[in-house]
Amino acid sequence: MDAAADEGYGARVVAVGADRDDIEGLARARRAGLPTFVVKVADHATREGWDEALCARIAEHRPDLVVSAGFMKILGPRVLQAFTVVNTHPALLPAFPGARAVPQALAYGVRVTGCTVHLVDAGVDTGPVIAQEPVAVEDGDDERSLHERIKIVERRLLVDVVGRMARHGWTLTGRHVRLGAAAGDGGQ
């Protein structure tokens, strides 16, 4: 939201959605006067029903891009077929996918981990990589200290990638994402 306040950024936030009520992202969006919505999994008989409802709520706002950062749910086929979704992950994918990436990196003893911005597909952190940035593991790091340093880099990288996608487009060829698509080469 902060980056989008600059007209040169190239993107604007059209709505903020969540799967639960009590998150700061919704409160912050409301304070900024942005539309918000909540679609809870528990309010639907099946995951398919939740996916359908989530897709409908997102579609109401007609986004060009959906940013799923911090949304710790696997998106279903309706959402993934209807929208381009970008997510972040606190590791250098394909290493350490899933919700426990930081403790797994520490347990493995890596000296460098990092963060990834990627397109979302039907797998868990298996979508094509858009950008990555390393973060050193320091002696004495615990899960909290390392994750805090990763989050700083992750947020900056996500803001940069979304702005570049909005301003310059992108292409996807196989698993290769290229930002700054040239006219006529299939950019989105």
Image (cartoon, rainbow, N blue to C red):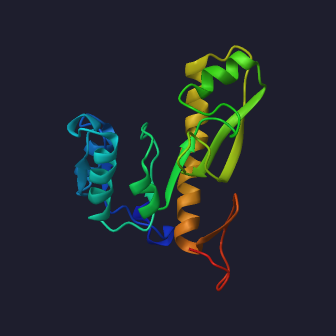
**Quarter of the figure with residue 101:** top right
The residue closer to the viewer here, 147 or 118, is 118
The residue closer to the viewer here, 174 or 144, is 174
| In-image side of 126 versus 59 (left or right) | right
Q: Is residue 91 above or below residue 13?
A: above
Q: Is residue 6 above or below residue 27?
A: below
Residue depicted at x 56% and y 43%: 123
Image coordinates of residue 155 in percent, x first then y, are 53, 45
Image coordinates of residue 163 in percent, x first then y, are 53, 64
Image coordinates of residue 53 in percent, x first then y, are 26, 52
Q: Quadrant of the C terminus?
A: bottom right
| In-image side of 115 versus 3 (left or right) | right
Q: Residue 187: in sight, yes or no?
A: yes
Image coordinates of residue 67 in percent, x first then y, are 45, 53
Q: Quadrant of the N terminus?
A: bottom left
Residue depicted at x 45% and y 41%: 74
Q: Residue 2: in sight, yes or no?
A: no
Residue depicted at x 59% and y 19%: 143
Number of callouts:
0
The residue closer to the viewer here, 59 or 23, is 59
Residue depicted at x 40% and y 63%: 5
**Quarter of the figure with residue 35:** bottom left
Q: Is residue 45 above or below residue 7?
A: above
